[in-house]
């Protein structure tokens, strides 16, 4: 879908009001602009048309690239628009080959799950800094070892650095 037609919802934790949106506190932003793309990894950096409302409790995450990414990671997502899910990982990244692409893989701990419709969900390190995005996988609740695939921010840094670090502080 074109970025201008996307709908971004904030404050959605449970589907309590999916069928009765008129009874919900609506925290939506309509539309975004594509700032830049990384075609090799199929990612785009978007700028929302408006800022979230001050009373929306939006969380602005920092980011981290390079060494010392830690061994504890967390992915937050709404698979297929369902209840918010948290997936926990512990350990080092492993290579995961899919087609001609090599992703960074993490084994799920059986806490939370990933699912279709969650591509682009954030991957945070143990300091809660953004370090990558979810691109696929099979973590499941109560079953350890499902492998999820990620593209790390450091792998797309050349495409995104001008916009995420305009003063080139990370050079």
Image (cartoon, rainbow, N blue to C red):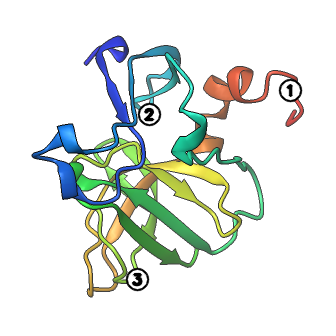
Q: Is residue 40 above or below residue 153?
A: above
Q: Is residue 117 above or below residue 86?
A: above
Residue 115 visible in image: no
- The residue that disc 1 covers is 168
Q: Return the disc, 3 or 2, that comes first in the chain's sequence.
A: 2
At horizontal 89% and vertical 32% (from top left) the residue drawn is 169
Q: Disc number at residue 106?
A: none
Q: Is residue 54 above or below residue 73?
A: above
User: Left or right: where does residue 132 sit relative to residue 121?
Assistant: right
List x then y, in percent, for residue 9: 36, 38
List x then y, in percent, for residue 139: 30, 71
Q: Return the disc, 1 or 3, that comes first in the chain's sequence.
A: 3
Q: Nearer the viewer, residue 153 or 11?
A: 11
Q: What is the secondary structure assignment of the residue under circle 2? A: loop
Q: In the figure, residue 113 lies in which quadrant?
A: bottom left
List x then y, in percent, for residue 110: 34, 83
User: Left or right: where does residue 115 sit relative to residue 59?
Assistant: left
- The residue that disc 2 covers is 41
What distance separates the C-alpha of mark 1 from that of mark 3?
36 Å
Q: What is the secondary structure assignment of the residue under circle 3? A: loop
Q: Which mark is nearer the camera, 3 or 2?
A: 3
Q: Which mark is nearer the camera, 2 or 1?
A: 1
Do callouts 3 and 2 mark residues in contact (Cβ within 8 Å)? no
At horizontal 71% and vertical 27% (from top left) the residue drawn is 161
Q: What is the secondary structure assignment of the residue under circle 1? A: loop
At horizontal 29% and vertical 15% (from top left) the residue drawn is 5
- The residue that disc 3 covers is 109
Residue 41 visible in image: yes
What distance separates the C-alpha of mark 3 from that of mark 2?
26 Å
């Amino acid at each position: 879908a074109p970025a201008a037609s996307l709908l971004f919802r904030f404050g959605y934790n449970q589907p309590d009001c999916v069928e009765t949106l008129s009874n919900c506190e609506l925290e939506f932003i309509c539309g975004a602009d594509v700032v830049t793309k990384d075609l090799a990894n199929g990612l785009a950096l978007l700028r929302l048309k408006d800022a979230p409302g001050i009373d929306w409790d939006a969380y602005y995450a920092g980011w981290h690239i390079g060494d010392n990414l830690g061994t504890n990671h967390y992915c937050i997502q709404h698979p297929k628009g369902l209840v918010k899910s948290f997936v926990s990982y512990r350990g080092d990244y492993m290579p995961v080959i899919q087609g001609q692409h090599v992703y960074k893989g993490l084994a799920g701990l059986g806490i939370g799950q990933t699912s279709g419709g969650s591509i682009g969900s954030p991957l945070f390190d143990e300091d809660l800094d953004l370090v990558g995005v979810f691109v696929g996988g099979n973590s499941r609740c109560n079953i350890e070892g499902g492998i999820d695939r990620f593209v790390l921010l450091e792998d797309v840094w050349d495409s995104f650095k001008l916009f995420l670090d305009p003063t080139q502080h990370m050079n």
